[in-house]
Image (spheres, rainbow, N blue to C red):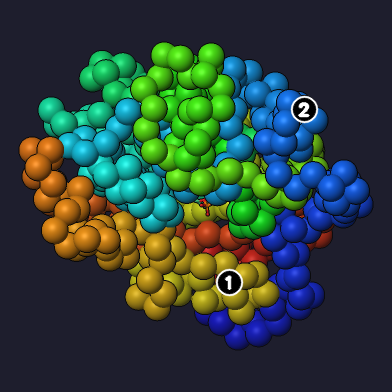
Amino acid sequence: MQLHDNHTPVRTKPWDFGLVSTAEIGELEKEYVLRVLDKKRVFRYSGSDNELSEAYQLEKLYSDRLGVQYCLGVNAGTSALVVALIGAGIGPGDEVIVPAYTYIATAAAVLIARAVPVIVDVDDTLTMDPQALEAAITPYTKAVIPVHMRGVPCQMDEIMAVATKHKLIVIEDVAQANGGSYKGKALGSIGNAGCFSFQQYKLVTAGEGGMLVTNDPSINARAMIYHDSAFVYWDMNKMAETVPFAGENYRLSELNAALALAQSQRIDSLVSRLQKVKSVIVDGIKDIAQIQLQRIPDPQGDLSYSLVFYLDTLEQSEQFSKLLVKEGIPNGTINNNGFADRHIFKNWKYVMEKQGASENDTPWNCQSYKGNVQYSQDMCPQTIDWLNRAIAINLHQNMTDEDCNDVIEAIRKVAATL
Ligand SMILES: *Cc1c(COP(=O)(O)O)cnc(C)c1O
Protein backbone atom coordinates (compact mmCIF):
# COMPACT_ATOMS: atom_id res chain seq x y z
CA MET A 1 0.00 0.00 0.00
CA GLN A 2 2.78 2.39 0.89
CA LEU A 3 4.21 1.88 -2.55
CA HIS A 4 1.21 3.63 -4.09
CA ASP A 5 2.13 6.74 -2.16
CA ASN A 6 5.69 6.62 -3.34
CA HIS A 7 5.51 9.11 -6.19
CA THR A 8 9.22 9.51 -6.82
CA PRO A 9 9.96 7.66 -10.08
CA VAL A 10 12.90 5.27 -10.14
CA ARG A 11 14.22 7.11 -13.18
CA THR A 12 13.93 10.80 -13.95
CA LYS A 13 16.78 10.89 -16.46
CA PRO A 14 15.46 10.95 -20.06
CA TRP A 15 15.56 7.73 -22.07
CA ASP A 16 17.00 8.87 -25.38
CA PHE A 17 18.94 6.02 -26.91
CA GLY A 18 17.42 6.07 -30.41
CA LEU A 19 17.52 3.09 -32.71
CA VAL A 20 20.14 0.35 -32.39
CA SER A 21 21.15 0.74 -36.06
CA THR A 22 21.25 4.49 -36.57
CA ALA A 23 23.00 5.18 -33.25
CA GLU A 24 26.03 3.51 -34.87
CA ILE A 25 26.14 5.65 -38.03
CA GLY A 26 29.55 7.31 -38.00
CA GLU A 27 32.83 7.79 -39.82
CA LEU A 28 32.91 4.35 -41.42
CA GLU A 29 29.49 4.84 -43.01
CA LYS A 30 30.55 8.26 -44.33
CA GLU A 31 33.78 6.86 -45.73
CA TYR A 32 32.06 3.99 -47.54
CA VAL A 33 29.25 6.10 -48.98
CA LEU A 34 31.67 8.80 -50.16
CA ARG A 35 33.86 6.10 -51.66
CA VAL A 36 30.94 5.18 -53.93
CA LEU A 37 30.59 8.79 -55.05
CA ASP A 38 34.35 9.13 -55.61
CA LYS A 39 34.34 5.99 -57.76
CA LYS A 40 31.36 7.38 -59.71
CA ARG A 41 29.99 3.87 -59.77
CA VAL A 42 26.50 3.83 -58.29
CA PHE A 43 25.22 0.72 -60.10
CA ARG A 44 26.60 -2.66 -59.22
CA TYR A 45 26.57 -4.50 -62.53
CA SER A 46 29.00 -2.36 -64.53
CA GLY A 47 31.15 -4.33 -66.92
CA SER A 48 33.41 -7.15 -65.87
CA ASP A 49 34.65 -5.80 -62.52
CA ASN A 50 31.65 -7.00 -60.52
CA GLU A 51 33.96 -8.00 -57.69
CA LEU A 52 34.88 -4.36 -57.06
CA SER A 53 31.27 -3.43 -56.36
CA GLU A 54 30.05 -2.67 -52.85
CA ALA A 55 27.16 -5.08 -53.38
CA TYR A 56 29.58 -7.90 -54.19
CA GLN A 57 31.67 -7.06 -51.10
CA LEU A 58 28.52 -7.15 -48.99
CA GLU A 59 27.53 -10.54 -50.41
CA LYS A 60 31.03 -11.82 -49.75
CA LEU A 61 30.85 -10.64 -46.13
CA TYR A 62 27.57 -12.51 -45.56
CA SER A 63 28.77 -15.56 -47.40
CA ASP A 64 31.84 -15.70 -45.12
CA ARG A 65 29.96 -14.82 -41.92
CA LEU A 66 27.26 -17.44 -42.46
CA GLY A 67 29.30 -20.05 -44.25
CA VAL A 68 26.83 -20.21 -47.14
CA GLN A 69 27.61 -20.60 -50.80
CA TYR A 70 25.31 -18.04 -52.41
CA CYS A 71 24.28 -14.55 -51.30
CA LEU A 72 22.20 -12.14 -53.34
CA GLY A 73 21.84 -8.52 -52.26
CA VAL A 74 18.40 -7.06 -53.01
CA ASN A 75 16.59 -3.81 -52.33
CA ALA A 76 14.50 -4.92 -49.30
CA GLY A 77 13.74 -7.73 -46.88
CA THR A 78 10.39 -8.25 -48.55
CA SER A 79 12.19 -8.66 -51.90
CA ALA A 80 14.51 -11.23 -50.31
CA LEU A 81 11.48 -13.26 -49.19
CA VAL A 82 9.88 -13.02 -52.64
CA VAL A 83 13.01 -14.14 -54.48
CA ALA A 84 13.48 -16.99 -51.99
CA LEU A 85 9.91 -18.21 -52.56
CA ILE A 86 10.07 -17.84 -56.35
CA GLY A 87 13.56 -19.30 -56.24
CA ALA A 88 12.28 -22.37 -54.41
CA GLY A 89 9.60 -22.85 -57.08
CA ILE A 90 6.70 -21.84 -54.90
CA GLY A 91 3.68 -20.44 -56.74
CA PRO A 92 -0.05 -20.79 -57.48
CA GLY A 93 -1.67 -23.71 -55.69
CA ASP A 94 0.92 -23.89 -52.92
CA GLU A 95 0.39 -23.20 -49.24
CA VAL A 96 3.16 -21.64 -47.15
CA ILE A 97 2.98 -21.72 -43.36
CA VAL A 98 3.80 -18.49 -41.51
CA PRO A 99 3.58 -17.56 -37.81
CA ALA A 100 0.70 -15.47 -36.43
CA TYR A 101 3.21 -13.00 -34.98
CA THR A 102 5.49 -11.52 -37.64
CA TYR A 103 5.56 -8.38 -39.74
CA ILE A 104 2.82 -8.47 -42.43
CA ALA A 105 5.58 -8.52 -45.09
CA THR A 106 6.15 -12.24 -44.42
CA ALA A 107 2.58 -13.05 -45.45
CA ALA A 108 2.64 -10.43 -48.24
CA ALA A 109 5.68 -12.07 -49.83
CA VAL A 110 3.79 -15.38 -50.00
CA LEU A 111 0.89 -13.64 -51.76
CA ILE A 112 3.22 -11.86 -54.18
CA ALA A 113 4.58 -15.30 -55.12
CA ARG A 114 0.89 -16.17 -55.82
CA ALA A 115 0.81 -18.75 -53.01
CA VAL A 116 -1.53 -18.94 -50.00
CA PRO A 117 -0.30 -18.11 -46.48
CA VAL A 118 -1.43 -20.45 -43.70
CA ILE A 119 -1.17 -18.82 -40.29
CA VAL A 120 -0.14 -20.80 -37.19
CA ASP A 121 0.27 -20.03 -33.50
CA VAL A 122 3.41 -18.88 -31.74
CA ASP A 123 4.17 -20.09 -28.21
CA ASP A 124 5.88 -18.58 -25.15
CA THR A 125 8.99 -17.92 -27.28
CA LEU A 126 6.82 -15.62 -29.48
CA THR A 127 8.12 -17.65 -32.43
CA MET A 128 6.41 -20.43 -34.40
CA ASP A 129 5.08 -23.32 -32.30
CA PRO A 130 6.48 -26.50 -33.96
CA GLN A 131 3.34 -28.48 -33.00
CA ALA A 132 1.10 -25.86 -34.57
CA LEU A 133 3.26 -26.08 -37.69
CA GLU A 134 2.80 -29.84 -37.97
CA ALA A 135 -0.95 -29.59 -37.33
CA ALA A 136 -1.41 -27.11 -40.19
CA ILE A 137 0.22 -29.20 -42.91
CA THR A 138 -2.09 -30.17 -45.82
CA PRO A 139 -1.41 -31.93 -49.14
CA TYR A 140 -0.80 -28.42 -50.58
CA THR A 141 1.85 -27.29 -48.08
CA LYS A 142 5.12 -26.58 -49.86
CA ALA A 143 7.11 -24.43 -47.49
CA VAL A 144 7.34 -22.91 -44.02
CA ILE A 145 8.74 -19.53 -43.00
CA PRO A 146 9.97 -19.54 -39.39
CA VAL A 147 10.52 -15.95 -38.26
CA HIS A 148 13.18 -15.16 -35.66
CA MET A 149 11.06 -12.45 -34.07
CA ARG A 150 12.57 -9.67 -31.96
CA GLY A 151 16.00 -11.18 -32.39
CA VAL A 152 15.00 -14.48 -30.74
CA PRO A 153 15.96 -17.70 -32.55
CA CYS A 154 13.11 -20.07 -33.41
CA GLN A 155 13.04 -23.67 -32.19
CA MET A 156 14.92 -24.75 -35.30
CA ASP A 157 15.62 -28.39 -34.30
CA GLU A 158 11.90 -29.09 -33.93
CA ILE A 159 10.94 -27.06 -37.01
CA MET A 160 13.58 -28.73 -39.19
CA ALA A 161 12.43 -32.17 -37.96
CA VAL A 162 8.82 -31.44 -38.98
CA ALA A 163 9.97 -29.98 -42.31
CA THR A 164 12.17 -32.96 -43.11
CA LYS A 165 9.41 -35.43 -42.19
CA HIS A 166 6.90 -33.68 -44.48
CA LYS A 167 9.40 -32.60 -47.18
CA LEU A 168 8.81 -28.89 -46.72
CA ILE A 169 11.14 -26.13 -47.88
CA VAL A 170 12.31 -23.95 -44.97
CA ILE A 171 12.82 -20.24 -45.61
CA GLU A 172 14.10 -18.42 -42.52
CA ASP A 173 12.91 -14.83 -42.09
CA VAL A 174 15.95 -13.26 -40.42
CA ALA A 175 14.83 -9.64 -40.91
CA GLN A 176 14.77 -9.04 -37.14
CA ALA A 177 17.65 -11.33 -36.19
CA ASN A 178 20.69 -10.48 -38.33
CA GLY A 179 23.64 -11.79 -36.30
CA GLY A 180 21.70 -14.27 -34.21
CA SER A 181 22.42 -17.98 -33.95
CA TYR A 182 20.87 -21.26 -32.88
CA LYS A 183 23.06 -23.94 -31.27
CA GLY A 184 26.13 -22.39 -32.86
CA LYS A 185 24.65 -22.10 -36.36
CA ALA A 186 24.09 -18.66 -37.88
CA LEU A 187 20.41 -17.82 -38.34
CA GLY A 188 19.62 -17.87 -42.04
CA SER A 189 22.00 -20.77 -42.71
CA ILE A 190 19.87 -23.53 -41.17
CA GLY A 191 16.95 -23.81 -43.60
CA ASN A 192 17.00 -23.96 -47.42
CA ALA A 193 17.24 -20.17 -47.59
CA GLY A 194 17.53 -17.15 -45.28
CA CYS A 195 16.19 -13.64 -45.84
CA PHE A 196 17.65 -10.49 -44.27
CA SER A 197 16.49 -6.88 -44.18
CA PHE A 198 18.56 -3.69 -43.88
CA GLN A 199 15.61 -1.42 -43.20
CA GLN A 200 16.13 1.19 -40.49
CA TYR A 201 14.41 -0.67 -37.62
CA LYS A 202 16.64 -3.73 -37.96
CA LEU A 203 19.91 -4.38 -36.12
CA VAL A 204 22.01 -2.91 -38.96
CA THR A 205 20.66 -0.69 -41.69
CA ALA A 206 21.14 0.70 -45.16
CA GLY A 207 17.87 2.62 -45.01
CA GLU A 208 16.51 -0.02 -47.38
CA GLY A 209 18.04 -3.28 -48.50
CA GLY A 210 17.95 -7.03 -48.12
CA MET A 211 19.87 -10.25 -48.69
CA LEU A 212 19.00 -13.78 -49.74
CA VAL A 213 21.37 -16.51 -48.58
CA THR A 214 21.25 -20.15 -49.67
CA ASN A 215 23.35 -23.20 -50.42
CA ASP A 216 20.92 -24.37 -53.12
CA PRO A 217 22.15 -23.51 -56.65
CA SER A 218 18.65 -23.74 -58.11
CA ILE A 219 17.12 -21.36 -55.55
CA ASN A 220 20.01 -18.99 -56.20
CA ALA A 221 19.74 -19.09 -60.01
CA ARG A 222 15.96 -18.59 -60.01
CA ALA A 223 16.26 -15.81 -57.40
CA MET A 224 18.82 -14.04 -59.59
CA ILE A 225 16.46 -14.30 -62.55
CA TYR A 226 13.58 -12.84 -60.55
CA HIS A 227 15.63 -9.96 -59.14
CA ASP A 228 16.35 -8.53 -62.62
CA SER A 229 14.22 -8.81 -65.75
CA ALA A 230 17.16 -9.52 -68.06
CA PHE A 231 19.57 -11.30 -65.73
CA VAL A 232 18.95 -14.69 -67.27
CA TYR A 233 20.51 -13.46 -70.55
CA TRP A 234 23.62 -12.00 -68.95
CA ASP A 235 25.34 -15.16 -67.92
CA MET A 236 24.13 -18.00 -70.07
CA ASN A 237 26.71 -20.38 -68.63
CA LYS A 238 25.56 -19.97 -65.06
CA MET A 239 21.92 -20.05 -66.09
CA ALA A 240 22.23 -22.90 -68.59
CA GLU A 241 20.15 -25.32 -66.57
CA THR A 242 17.49 -22.79 -65.62
CA VAL A 243 14.35 -22.12 -67.65
CA PRO A 244 14.05 -18.34 -68.21
CA PHE A 245 11.07 -16.37 -66.94
CA ALA A 246 10.22 -12.72 -66.31
CA GLY A 247 11.64 -11.01 -63.24
CA GLU A 248 11.04 -7.74 -61.46
CA ASN A 249 13.73 -5.26 -60.46
CA TYR A 250 14.91 -5.89 -56.90
CA ARG A 251 18.53 -4.88 -57.51
CA LEU A 252 20.57 -3.43 -54.65
CA SER A 253 22.02 0.06 -55.19
CA GLU A 254 25.70 0.68 -54.52
CA LEU A 255 24.95 3.46 -52.03
CA ASN A 256 22.75 1.17 -49.96
CA ALA A 257 25.26 -1.66 -50.26
CA ALA A 258 28.05 0.62 -48.98
CA LEU A 259 25.98 1.60 -45.94
CA ALA A 260 25.07 -2.01 -45.23
CA LEU A 261 28.71 -3.02 -45.62
CA ALA A 262 29.89 -0.49 -43.05
CA GLN A 263 27.15 -1.42 -40.60
CA SER A 264 27.46 -5.18 -41.08
CA GLN A 265 31.11 -5.12 -40.02
CA ARG A 266 30.08 -4.36 -36.46
CA ILE A 267 27.31 -6.93 -36.05
CA ASP A 268 29.28 -9.10 -33.63
CA SER A 269 30.37 -6.21 -31.43
CA LEU A 270 26.83 -4.82 -31.44
CA VAL A 271 25.33 -8.16 -30.43
CA SER A 272 27.84 -8.69 -27.65
CA ARG A 273 27.15 -5.22 -26.23
CA LEU A 274 23.40 -5.90 -26.34
CA GLN A 275 23.83 -9.33 -24.77
CA LYS A 276 25.76 -7.80 -21.88
CA VAL A 277 22.96 -5.32 -21.23
CA LYS A 278 20.21 -7.94 -21.37
CA SER A 279 22.02 -10.42 -19.16
CA VAL A 280 22.53 -7.81 -16.43
CA ILE A 281 18.80 -7.02 -16.48
CA VAL A 282 17.67 -10.65 -16.67
CA ASP A 283 19.91 -11.50 -13.69
CA GLY A 284 18.25 -8.70 -11.76
CA ILE A 285 14.66 -9.75 -12.42
CA LYS A 286 14.64 -13.52 -12.93
CA ASP A 287 13.64 -14.26 -9.33
CA ILE A 288 10.51 -12.05 -9.41
CA ALA A 289 7.57 -14.38 -8.83
CA GLN A 290 4.94 -12.10 -10.39
CA ILE A 291 6.47 -12.12 -13.87
CA GLN A 292 7.39 -14.86 -16.34
CA LEU A 293 10.30 -14.24 -18.70
CA GLN A 294 9.93 -15.03 -22.40
CA ARG A 295 11.36 -18.48 -23.16
CA ILE A 296 14.44 -18.14 -25.40
CA PRO A 297 15.25 -21.31 -27.41
CA ASP A 298 18.98 -20.50 -27.33
CA PRO A 299 19.94 -17.53 -25.12
CA GLN A 300 23.46 -17.46 -26.58
CA GLY A 301 22.00 -16.75 -30.00
CA ASP A 302 19.54 -14.08 -28.86
CA LEU A 303 20.31 -10.65 -30.34
CA SER A 304 19.10 -9.29 -27.00
CA TYR A 305 17.70 -5.93 -28.10
CA SER A 306 14.29 -6.94 -26.75
CA LEU A 307 13.25 -7.87 -23.22
CA VAL A 308 9.83 -9.52 -22.95
CA PHE A 309 8.04 -10.84 -19.90
CA TYR A 310 4.48 -11.98 -19.21
CA LEU A 311 1.93 -11.15 -16.53
CA ASP A 312 -1.04 -13.35 -15.60
CA THR A 313 -3.76 -11.39 -17.42
CA LEU A 314 -4.28 -8.65 -20.00
CA GLU A 315 -5.53 -6.28 -17.29
CA GLN A 316 -2.41 -6.92 -15.26
CA SER A 317 -0.04 -6.31 -18.17
CA GLU A 318 -1.79 -3.05 -19.08
CA GLN A 319 -1.59 -1.87 -15.50
CA PHE A 320 2.03 -2.98 -15.17
CA SER A 321 2.99 -1.18 -18.38
CA LYS A 322 1.45 2.11 -17.21
CA LEU A 323 3.16 1.94 -13.84
CA LEU A 324 6.48 1.16 -15.49
CA VAL A 325 6.13 4.26 -17.69
CA LYS A 326 5.48 6.28 -14.52
CA GLU A 327 8.75 4.92 -13.17
CA GLY A 328 10.53 6.39 -16.20
CA ILE A 329 10.97 3.18 -18.23
CA PRO A 330 9.48 3.26 -21.75
CA ASN A 331 7.79 -0.06 -22.58
CA GLY A 332 4.72 -1.40 -24.28
CA THR A 333 2.13 -4.12 -24.17
CA ILE A 334 2.12 -5.96 -27.50
CA ASN A 335 -1.57 -6.58 -28.16
CA ASN A 336 -3.82 -3.68 -27.30
CA ASN A 337 -6.82 -2.01 -28.86
CA GLY A 338 -5.11 1.32 -29.39
CA PHE A 339 -2.86 0.71 -32.36
CA ALA A 340 -3.47 -1.89 -35.11
CA ASP A 341 -0.02 -3.49 -34.97
CA ARG A 342 0.72 -5.09 -38.36
CA HIS A 343 2.92 -7.65 -36.64
CA ILE A 344 -0.22 -9.45 -35.38
CA PHE A 345 -2.19 -11.62 -37.85
CA LYS A 346 -5.59 -10.18 -36.88
CA ASN A 347 -4.46 -6.79 -38.24
CA TRP A 348 -3.36 -8.19 -41.63
CA LYS A 349 -6.61 -6.97 -43.17
CA TYR A 350 -5.97 -7.86 -46.82
CA VAL A 351 -4.89 -11.36 -45.80
CA MET A 352 -7.78 -11.94 -43.40
CA GLU A 353 -10.26 -10.75 -46.06
CA LYS A 354 -8.50 -12.55 -48.94
CA GLN A 355 -8.15 -9.38 -51.00
CA GLY A 356 -5.85 -9.40 -54.02
CA ALA A 357 -4.79 -6.66 -56.44
CA SER A 358 -7.31 -8.12 -58.87
CA GLU A 359 -10.67 -9.29 -57.58
CA ASN A 360 -11.00 -12.04 -60.19
CA ASP A 361 -7.64 -13.63 -59.73
CA THR A 362 -6.23 -13.97 -56.23
CA PRO A 363 -4.01 -16.73 -54.81
CA TRP A 364 -7.10 -18.03 -52.98
CA ASN A 365 -9.56 -18.19 -55.88
CA CYS A 366 -7.15 -19.15 -58.67
CA GLN A 367 -7.69 -22.41 -60.61
CA SER A 368 -4.55 -24.07 -59.27
CA TYR A 369 -5.49 -23.76 -55.61
CA LYS A 370 -7.36 -26.82 -54.36
CA GLY A 371 -7.10 -26.11 -50.66
CA ASN A 372 -9.53 -24.18 -48.49
CA VAL A 373 -7.67 -22.09 -45.95
CA GLN A 374 -9.86 -20.10 -43.56
CA TYR A 375 -8.94 -17.05 -41.51
CA SER A 376 -10.81 -15.58 -38.57
CA GLN A 377 -10.22 -13.10 -35.80
CA ASP A 378 -10.47 -15.85 -33.18
CA MET A 379 -7.99 -18.26 -34.75
CA CYS A 380 -4.58 -18.64 -33.03
CA PRO A 381 -5.90 -18.00 -29.48
CA GLN A 382 -2.58 -19.14 -28.01
CA THR A 383 -0.79 -16.30 -29.83
CA ILE A 384 -3.30 -13.74 -28.62
CA ASP A 385 -3.01 -15.03 -25.07
CA TRP A 386 0.80 -14.66 -24.97
CA LEU A 387 0.71 -11.28 -26.70
CA ASN A 388 -2.02 -10.02 -24.35
CA ARG A 389 0.09 -10.78 -21.32
CA ALA A 390 3.41 -9.57 -22.73
CA ILE A 391 5.37 -6.45 -21.87
CA ALA A 392 8.23 -5.49 -24.15
CA ILE A 393 11.14 -3.19 -23.39
CA ASN A 394 13.51 -2.22 -26.20
CA LEU A 395 17.10 -2.39 -25.03
CA HIS A 396 20.07 -0.50 -26.44
CA GLN A 397 23.80 -1.16 -26.79
CA ASN A 398 24.60 2.19 -25.15
CA MET A 399 22.79 1.41 -21.87
CA THR A 400 25.12 1.71 -18.88
CA ASP A 401 25.00 -0.37 -15.69
CA GLU A 402 23.11 2.54 -14.13
CA ASP A 403 20.50 2.40 -16.91
CA CYS A 404 20.18 -1.37 -16.45
CA ASN A 405 19.75 -0.91 -12.71
CA ASP A 406 16.96 1.61 -13.32
CA VAL A 407 15.12 -1.00 -15.38
CA ILE A 408 15.61 -3.68 -12.71
CA GLU A 409 14.55 -1.41 -9.86
CA ALA A 410 11.49 -0.15 -11.71
CA ILE A 411 10.31 -3.67 -12.59
CA ARG A 412 10.86 -4.83 -8.99
CA LYS A 413 8.99 -1.81 -7.64
CA VAL A 414 5.99 -2.30 -9.95
CA ALA A 415 5.91 -6.09 -9.39
CA ALA A 416 5.71 -5.47 -5.64
CA THR A 417 2.41 -3.63 -6.16
CA LEU A 418 0.73 -6.74 -7.65
C1 LIG B 1 11.10 -5.74 -41.61
C2 LIG B 1 10.62 -7.11 -41.82
C3 LIG B 1 10.42 -7.64 -43.11
C4 LIG B 1 10.49 -6.80 -44.34
O1 LIG B 1 11.67 -6.13 -44.55
P1 LIG B 1 11.68 -4.80 -45.45
O2 LIG B 1 13.14 -4.54 -45.64
O3 LIG B 1 10.98 -3.73 -44.71
O4 LIG B 1 11.01 -5.13 -46.74
C5 LIG B 1 10.07 -8.97 -43.22
N1 LIG B 1 9.88 -9.74 -42.13
C6 LIG B 1 10.06 -9.27 -40.89
C7 LIG B 1 9.87 -10.19 -39.73
C8 LIG B 1 10.40 -7.93 -40.68
O5 LIG B 1 10.54 -7.48 -39.44
> What residue is rendered at 27% in x and 36% in y?
91
x, y (%) of residue 199? 61, 54
Q: Is residue 249 visible?
A: yes
Judged from the image, the secondary structure of the residue bearing numbered disc 1 is: helix
Residue type marked 2: Asp
x, y (%) of residue 93? 17, 37
**Gap in Å between the C-alphas at discs 1 and 2?**
55 Å
Which callout, 1 or 2, points at the residue further toward the start of the chain?
Answer: 2
Q: Is residue 38 left or right of residue 171?
A: right
> What residue is rendered at 59% in x and 17% in y?
69
Judged from the image, the secondary structure of the residue bearing numbered disc 2 is: loop
Q: Which mark is residue 324?
A: 1
Mark 2 burial class by Cα count in 10 Å: few <14, some 14-19, many 20+: few
Q: Is mark 1 within 8 Å of ligand 1?
A: no
Q: CB atoms at circles 1 and 2 under 8 Å apart?
A: no
> What residue is rendered at 58% in x and 47% in y?
75
Residue ID for mark 2? 49
Residue type marked 1: Leu
Q: Which mark is residue 11?
A: none
x, y (%) of residue 373? 13, 46
